[in-house]
Image (cartoon, rainbow, N blue to C red):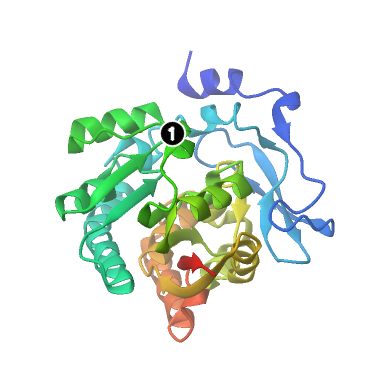
Amino acid sequence: MGFLTETLLSLPPVSEIVTYSQCPACDNGNISHKFTAIDHTVTKKAFDIWECAACSLRFTQNVPSREAIAPYYQSQAYVSHSETKKGIINKLYHWVRTYTLRAKRRMIIHLTTLRKGKLLDIGAGTGSFAALMQKAGWEVTGLEPDETARQNARQHHQLELQPIEKLGDQPANHFDVITLWHVLEHVHDLHRYLDTFYRLLAPRGTLFVAVPNYTSLDADTYEAHWAAWDVPRHLYHFSPHSMDILAERHGMQVVAHKPMWFDSFYVSMLSEQYKNGFNNLPAAFWNGWLSNWGAFDDVSKCSSVIYVIRKK
């Protein structure tokens, strides 16, 4: 029995899906269907994307529940869990990641004015960022829901990550920095997580949230083929406006936007493959460059945005 057949047989029945009757971010009932996107990573199954007219959040409708979504992550192509370097896109991903990890460390030091401190990395994947910060002298706690990713963190970085269930056990007002690098779009209990972040942050602490931005030019270019929809693993699709409203609702505010310039190229490469069935690298780099050019004067238009958030 092949991997895909096994996966399809293990997918959740209809009773194990989440259907929203109101916006999962602001609770407004004025929501409507926008278009349908395909799960290109695992199942090739179609999922509908809806939008809230009030806060502009987009979200994946009829997603597998928290208990049922695990099979959608079981793919060797899911690079944040497997550390795979197969294929040109994954090779480029790892090459760029070496640079971006150091850039994240420099950004955190600059924006917090701390050379060392207490850091909580949520959705730590295989532990690359957590290991880098630990080596730089930070006291790091890393949480990761996927057992395979935790094993890879142990193997590649000698790092013991905790399961995500340990989030609620962390001490209040303790962390100078909490980081979520492309994680918030995956969590089912969105409001519980944000309430927990507020509780765990030190009074002058900073929350860094990196998520894809569907208001970017590359999202407009590729439309339903935009790789960052990544349904159904991405439950939410944020705009800067929706992130502002979400932070405000939980007693926090977005104080800065920071760009993730490389994401437009990586996402465009995947999008070209999804749209055309092959890696059209010249087109991908051109569209990634155009997206960044359009965001040069306004980084809130980047393919992915890092939201810098603090308590009000």
The kind of residue tagged 1 is: Lys
In this figure, which residue is indicated by the disc labeled 1?
Answer: 166
Residue 197 appears left or right of 205: right
Would you say 245 lies left or right of 285 here?
right
Which residue lies at the image location 53% right of the left edge and 23% below the top edge?
Answer: 7
**Residue 53 percent across, percent down from the top left:** 78, 65
- Left or right: where does residue 205 sit relative to residue 136? right
Q: Residue 247 lies in what quarter of the image?
A: bottom right
The quarter holding residue 27 reads bottom right
- Residue 106 position, x and y percent, is 24, 68
Q: Classify residue 216 by image quadrant.
A: bottom right
Residue 177 location in percent, x, y?
A: 36, 58
Q: Nearer the viewer, residue 86 or 197?
A: 197
- Dot 1: element: helix
Q: Residue at x 49, y 39 (%)?
A: 41
Q: Residues within 10 Å of mark 1 (few under 14, many from 20)?
A: few
Most foreground residue, 176 or 91: 176
Question: In which quadrant will I find the C terminus?
Answer: bottom right
**Residue 276 in view here:** no
Q: Is residue 265 above or below residue 24?
A: below
